[in-house]
Image: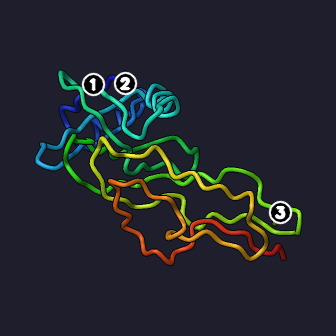
Amino acid sequence: MLEGIIRESIEKKSTKALRRDGYLIANIYGKGLPNINAAFKENEFIKAVRKKETLAFPVKVGDKTLDVVVIEYQKDPINSHLVHVDLKVAQKGLVTKYMIPVRPVGTPVGLKNKGILVQSKKRLCVKCKAEDLPTSFEINVSDLDVGDTVLVRDLEVPANITMMETDRIAVVGVIKAK
């Protein structure tokens, strides 16, 4: 389990000192919960996110253990180190919006016909309870030829999940290379 510290001060000087010591600044929030200003060791956070098996993963901050989902992160433009992350508490029984990653699976037929696979949407917005949260939307792209696309309406959405995206938006497709 990932363990972090609660930041006592949110001033610029103390934030810079934490970053110098290898900490990643984080904000943890949820509906009806007080915001928590936290910090995690950057390397430990990256390892925890990479080895997680579901979208929500547990963190311990102070004396609280929370299941959280990564909402947004910011990187340093020069050296690509993580600088800041926003975490949302995945509360059981509460319907909220989440961004679910899209993962294309397979090799499209169109790549042999001088096509390029284009992923228009990296994440899709859904509304669901934390216990119904899917890990990702896997799309089989093996049958796609040049000019074929997969739209939001073509996806198989589980029963307890409401898709918040417009159904005519392209998710992945194969276009002709120039």
Helix, strand or loop under label 1: strand
Seen from the viewer's position, the closer of residues 50 and 13 is 50
Q: Give the x, y percent position of residue 105.
A: 67, 50
Q: Position of residue 16 (x, y in %)?
A: 35, 38
Give the residue number, with chain letter if any, for mark 1: 60
Q: Nearer the viewer, residue 112 or 26?
A: 112
55 above or below 178? above
Residue linked to disc 3: 111
Q: Are marks 2 and 1 in contact (CB under 8 Å)?
A: yes
Q: Amino acid at mark 2?
A: Leu
Q: In the image shown, does 107 or 52 lie closer to the viewer?
A: 107
Residue shown at the point (57%, 67%) measured from the top left: 171
Q: Residue at point 37% right, 50% down?
A: 71
**Circle 2 is placed at which residue position?**
2
The image's colour scheme reads: rainbow
In the image, what residue occupies the spot 31% across and 28% down? Answer: 59
Check disc 2: other Cα within 10 Å, few if <14, some if 14-19, many if 20+. Answer: some
N-term mark: 2 or 1: 2
* Image x and y of residue 158, in percent: 41, 53
Give the camera-side residue of 60 and 135: 135
